[in-house]
Image (spheres, grey):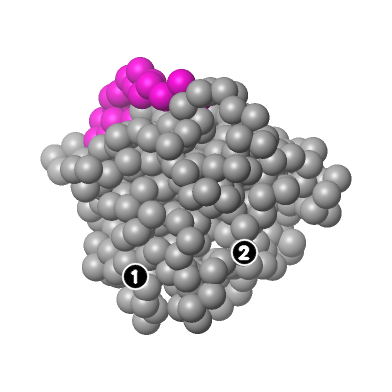
């Protein structure tokens, strides 16, 4: 039977990042600003590694069965997801991602990018951009970008801790300043930047925009402000869980673990899919036959399909991601 292992992230120093990924998650990575931690990734732009230094991508190539039978079909046998922690000290650019068909035809990539955001924390005035506040056409958008007025036509949504948002490919979007987010997405790094507030990068140059490609993939219809879905907690000894998102590419559950004075909940993956456990608060330990993995806030554990039987012990909040 297959055993789980801890992953180490790749860090990104994008200009809008802050310091909370070190301050709050104690990742101990010497980088400033610290914008993103790619905690579970096989993407060459930001691979995560095992504690012994092996890349997760190489481990999956050696053991394709770790993915599971269903997960192998989602991305043609490739690892289908990418998980990030994001600290937006400043506004991210307004951007859009292509879908799978466009990515295959125009970018030589098998996957586009749909994603889910789970708000780990947010300042009182924090917001995000989700589509347009009215129907627009391509020329209107191009004119607004040139005039610096495009923000007036965007749908701004206030956010708070524990909110979640599914951003389908083609949806124009942006994470606002003051948001700390866990992002689960397709394993893709295709981003078309539509607008970037005319701000310079660390070298004093404006970052390039991708207006033509953005216009080819963007949904220009009005987007209703997304309502938070009904969420129902399911209880068992030592834990409660709720479904956050289920789509073609991934399923995400939030697990509230508290085994103080209670039995430890069992955890085992089947033949269909791997699981990834991301600890977003608290700490605990994953136990099983030959398995003893302590985990803390910010740690990410990969659990292969057909794993040994495991138990969770501790007091923590986890995101359980599968395919």
Mark 1 / mark 2, whichever is N-terminal: 1
In 3D space, how far apart are the residues under numbered discs 1 and 2 (Cα atoms)?
A: 30 Å
**Does the magenta portion include 188?**
no
Position of residue 240 measured from the top left corner of the image (x, y, whole percent): 29, 30
| Residue at image location 83% in from the left, 54% down from the top | 108
Residue 301 falls in image quadrant:
bottom left
The residue carrying mark 2 is: 208
Q: How many residues crowd mark 2 within 10 Å: few (<14), some (14–19), many (20+)?
A: few
Residue 13, relative to residue 139: is it above or below? below
Residue 105 falls in image quadrant:
top right
Q: Residue furthest right?
A: 105
Between 258 and 317, the residue placed more toward the observer is 317
The quarter of the image holding the C terminus is top right
Q: How many residues crowd mark 1 within 10 Å: few (<14), some (14–19), many (20+)?
A: some
| Residue at image location 26% in from the left, 37% down from the top | 160
Position of residue 54 measured from the top left corner of the image (x, y, whole percent): 60, 74
Q: Is residue 23 visible?
A: yes
Position of residue 75 measured from the top left corner of the image (x, y, whole percent): 74, 44
């Amino acid at each position: 039977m297959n055993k789980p292992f801890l992953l180490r992230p790749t860090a990104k120093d994008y200009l809008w990042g802050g310091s909370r990924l070190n301050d709050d998650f104690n990742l101990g990575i010497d980088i400033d600003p610290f914008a993103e931690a790619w905690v579970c990734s096989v993407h060459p732009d930001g691979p995560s590694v095992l504690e012994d230094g092996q890349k997760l991508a190489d481990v999956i190539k050696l053991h394709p069965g770790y993915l599971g039978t269903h997960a192998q079909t989602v991305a043609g046998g490739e690892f289908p997801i990418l998980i990030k922690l994001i600290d937006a000290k400043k506004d991210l650019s307004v951007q859009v991602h292509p879908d799978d068909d466009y990515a295959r035809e125009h970018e030589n990539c098998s996957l586009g990018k749909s994603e889910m955001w789970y708000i780990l924390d947010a300042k009182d005035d924090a917001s995000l951009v989700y589509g347009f506040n009215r129907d627009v056409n391509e020329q209107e958008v191009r004119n607004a970008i040139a005039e610096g007025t495009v923000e007036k036509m965007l749908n701004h949504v206030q956010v708070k801790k524990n909110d979640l948002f599914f951003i389908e490919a083609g949806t124009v979007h942006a994470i606002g300043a003051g948001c700390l987010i866990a992002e689960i997405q397709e394993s893709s790094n295709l981003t078309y930047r539509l607008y970037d507030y005319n701000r310079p990068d660390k070298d004093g140059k404006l970052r390039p925009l991708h207006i033509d490609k953005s216009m080819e993939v963007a949904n220009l219809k009005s987007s209703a402000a997304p309502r938070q879905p009904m969420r129902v907690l399911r209880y068992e000894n030592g834990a409660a869980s709720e479904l956050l998102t289920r789509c073609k590419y991934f399923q995400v559950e939030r697990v509230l673990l508290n085994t103080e004075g209670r039995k430890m909940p069992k955890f085992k993956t089947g033949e269909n899919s791997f699981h990834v456990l991301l600890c977003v608060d608290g700490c605990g330990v994953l136990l099983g036959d030959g398995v003893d993995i302590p985990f803390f806030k910010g740690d990410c554990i990969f659990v292969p399909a057909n794993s040994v039987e495991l138990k969770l012990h501790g007091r923590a909040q986890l995101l359980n991601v599968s395919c």
